[in-house]
Amino acid sequence: MEGKVHILVVDSQPDMRDMLADVLEDEGYRVTTAANGYEALEKVRAISFNIVIIDVKMPGLNSMELVRKLREADSKLTIIIMTGYSSLETSVEAVRTGVYDYITKPFQVEEMLLAIKRAVKEQELLRENKKLAGELEEAERNLKESRERLYRSEKSANIGRLAAGISHELKNLLGIINVVAHCLKKKVDKDDEKATKYLRTIEKDVNHANQLILNLLSLSRPGKDGPRLIDINELLKETLTLVEHQLSLQNIKVMAEYDSSLPQAPVEINQIKQVFTNIIFNAQEAMPLGGELHIATHFKKAPLELNGSSTIEIKFEDTGYGIPENNLPRIFEPFFSTSDREEKSGLGLPISRDIVRRHDGDIEVRSKLGVGTTFLIKLPVKRKTEKREEAMMRVRCGTIICEKDIGVYAG
């Protein structure tokens, strides 16, 4: 048991009260005394005790009534009764009111100490049982959540395979429509403006649908080629073609501002697309009644004198509900989600941060309740591996850069 066991001794006889207190303190217990039931009740309501020792015969409040009131004040108390008037009726009543032990005066000190030790041990066992029960409940809850996640994962895999098959069929159908449109184009009178316009619309929408399918398949297919130099602006535009219709149905207006000075960055295309998609879907969740999503790219060039890394910044700013301040430190924890939807796994943001960090980048978040949330992704223009390779190349070429900024010398 943590700390000293605190015992309340309640007896109307000062000599018995004080002597018992001295004995128990010598045994290492913390002891408080009370001369009657009313004083004992006040102290139990004000202070936490482990054990209460009560004399049956006291003036004022009846001992059994005191036991009931003490139980109401603190249900965890262990109560030991001591009396010089032992009877079967008193023993039965004591048991009924929840008394732990019943000691008859005059008693041996060892008898009282043994009763207290048994009471302390029982309290420890009860606490341990409660702790184990809580751990068992937590383990059962975690097992249930793991099964649900496994089911969702298997379900998602099956849907992914189904989507791949359906995408193949859709591309076949789009191919047929495209060929038919081409044939009709040859047969339609070129002066028929409406027919020509309709055919152009068919061709445009077929190409758009085909691009959507390609982007969707690209997103679901794991990257195998490693990082490639890519235009982040174009990558964002491709991602938006996948979700813009869904966002518009929810009355979410997307406003994008692209920095034309962005250099190409070495990224794994499908993974970065996944990051963009995760953050956009988070914004969509935060704006169930509609709103605005502002997306902007920015090239942050590092000062040469600091020898730092230039970065590309991609900002996603929504006008949603916002995230409570106490939840902000947890949003990148696996399986943490503020959504009550069952299909939300709570893995989108942790996966996104992991992907960004594997690109030697970083992801930051700011949020204010009722105003919205901003995610800022920072990707380096050069990865660490590239910098190491560049340094090795300089060494191989005989170029030495002085660390004290003395100068650059060609060997």
Image (tube, helix red, strand yellow):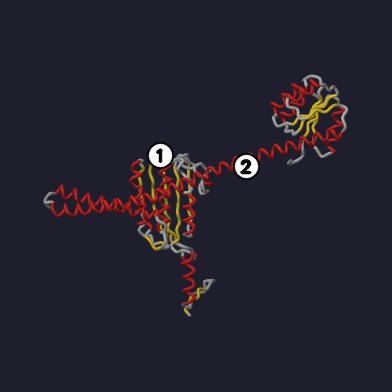
Is residue 380 visible in this depiction of the protein? Answer: yes
Q: 196 and 136: which one is in front?
A: 136
Mark 1 secondary-structure assignment? loop
Q: Residue at (78%, 33%) from the top-left corner?
A: 7
* Residue 12 spot, x, y in % from top left: 83, 24
* Residue 29 spot, x, y in % from top left: 80, 37
Q: How many marks?
A: 2
Which quadrant of the structure image shows residue 262? bottom left
Amino acid bearing label 2: Glu
Q: Earlier in the sequence, mark 2 or mark 1?
A: 2
Image quarter (top left, top right, bottom left or bottom right) of the N terminus: top right
The residue where tag 1 is placed is: 288
Q: Residue at (40%, 56%) from the top-left corner?
A: 221
Is residue 34 visible in this depiction of the protein? Answer: no
Q: Is residue 343 above or below residue 84?
A: below
Q: Is residue 60 above or below residue 304?
A: above
Residue lying furthest bottom in this view?
Answer: 411
Indicate which label's residue lies in the foreground, 2 or 1: 2
Amino acid bearing label 1: Pro
The residue where tag 2 is placed is: 135
Left-right relation of 335 to 27: left
* Residue 307 spot, x, y in % from top left: 49, 66
Q: Is residue 406 above or below residue 38?
A: below
Left-right relation of 286 to 173: right
* Residue 276 spot, x, y in % from top left: 41, 52
Which quadrant of the structure image shows residue 65? top right
Q: For label 1, count other residues whose C-alpha is less than 10 Å away and answer few (under 14), some (14-19) or many (20+).
A: few
Q: Residue at (37%, 60%) from the top-left corner?
A: 231
Mark 2 secondary-structure assignment? helix
Q: Is residue 151 above or below residue 106?
A: below
For residue 96, the mark is none
Q: For label 2, count other residues whose C-alpha is less than 10 Å away and answer few (under 14), some (14-19) or many (20+).
A: few
